[in-house]
Image (tube, rainbow, N blue to C red):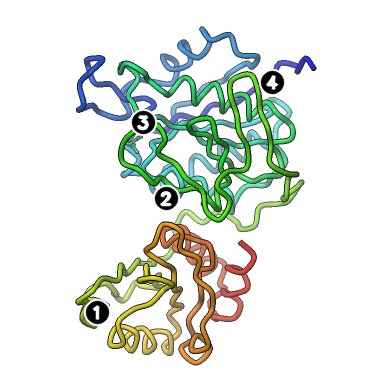
Amino acid sequence: MIMSTKNLLILATGGTIAGMAGSATRAEYAPGQIGIEQFLSGARALELNARFTGEQVANIGSEDMGPDVWAQLHARSIAALESDEFDGVIITHGTDTAEETAFLLDMTLPTNKPVALVGAMRPADAVGYDGLRNFANAVRVACDPAAAGRGVLVVMSDRVHAARDVRKSRTRGTEAFCGFPRESVGLVTPSALEWFGAAWRVDEDARFGFAADLPDVPILLIHAGMTPDYVARLVTDQTRGLVVAGAGEGNMPKAVRAELVALAAKGIPIVRASRLDEGLVDREPEDDDNRFVAARALTPQKARILLQLLIASEVSDPASIQLEFDRR
Ligand code: SIN
């Protein structure tokens, strides 16, 4: 089947996909060095079956990603999803926090057209640069009408991951991304795309309005030997909720738990997530009395974003928050 040529909006934010080392073999490099037009001239040379309109939203290492750039990405993506000009959106992004941007946009964009995030583990002048391969794959995904209705997708190393599932799991190497509970939702090459099952969010509206002014929700990473004063060190007058990156299935030392129960009683929502890579956290009987919420399949960093969006939407009682975590 011959696909018609699609028009894609490419929003560039930096990262290693736009990084430079100054040598094909040097380990040290700087992310966010080449601009979108330079990147797209490399992509156009691949003669992919798509037309690109590039916009430089930022050119940063994704450790500096946050609400200001998210607000721009959200506004530009919404405009493209609502316009007849574009068939889909691709966001080039650093790999370190791609999962957080993907999840935030997944919760705040409609699903009527494909939106894909893509990055690279090797800078643009490195031997074996993976950025153009990943980008060609993302183009293949974003050109497929069947990519719509799956929320925001992350395309890395020939796999398509859903925003809810994806996480960066390795600091090095091109096979750096995993998914949980679904490992991936499709396999892709520049010329082939196989979906594992049907789209699950066909023509859905955005689940939340975008709030640039996200409330303060810290993450408490539990470790052996933790004393309860860690909670007071993390929580300020500005704190509106807290996510526990718990041991095992969201567990924490008894004395820390007592501090958090006291906070929850004052109306600060507490979400129990897991610090484990495959950390499904279900409700435990004491959660009712403690007024705690179980993060289910969300990692602490994604649980934080969902809790921020809920609090920004004035959802703050534990039962209503739990319902929203149960739906993810
Ligand atoms: C970053 O996240 O900006 C640096 C790391 C990468 O893109 O692989």
Percent across and percent down for residue 184 are 57, 43
Name the residue beneath numbered marker 3. 121
Percent across and percent down for residue 287 are 50, 85
Mark 3 → mark 2, Cα distance in angstroms? 24 Å
> What is the number of the mark on residue 6?
4
* Beta carbon of the mark 3 residue lies under 8 A of ligand 1: yes
Going by the numbered disc 3, the residue's amino acid type is Met
Going by the numbered disc 4, the residue's amino acid type is Lys
Name the residue beneath numbered marker 2. 67
Mark 2 → mark 4, Cα distance in angstroms? 30 Å
Relative horizontal placement of residue 69, taking residue 1 as reference (left or right)? left
Q: Quadrant of the N terminus?
A: top right
Disc 1 vs disc 2: which is toward the camera? 1
Q: Sequence-wise, which precedes: disc 1 or disc 4?
A: 4
Q: Residue at x 53, y 62 (%)?
A: 297
Mark 1 → mark 3, Cα distance in angstroms? 38 Å
Q: The residue tagged with tag 2: helix, strand or loop?
A: helix
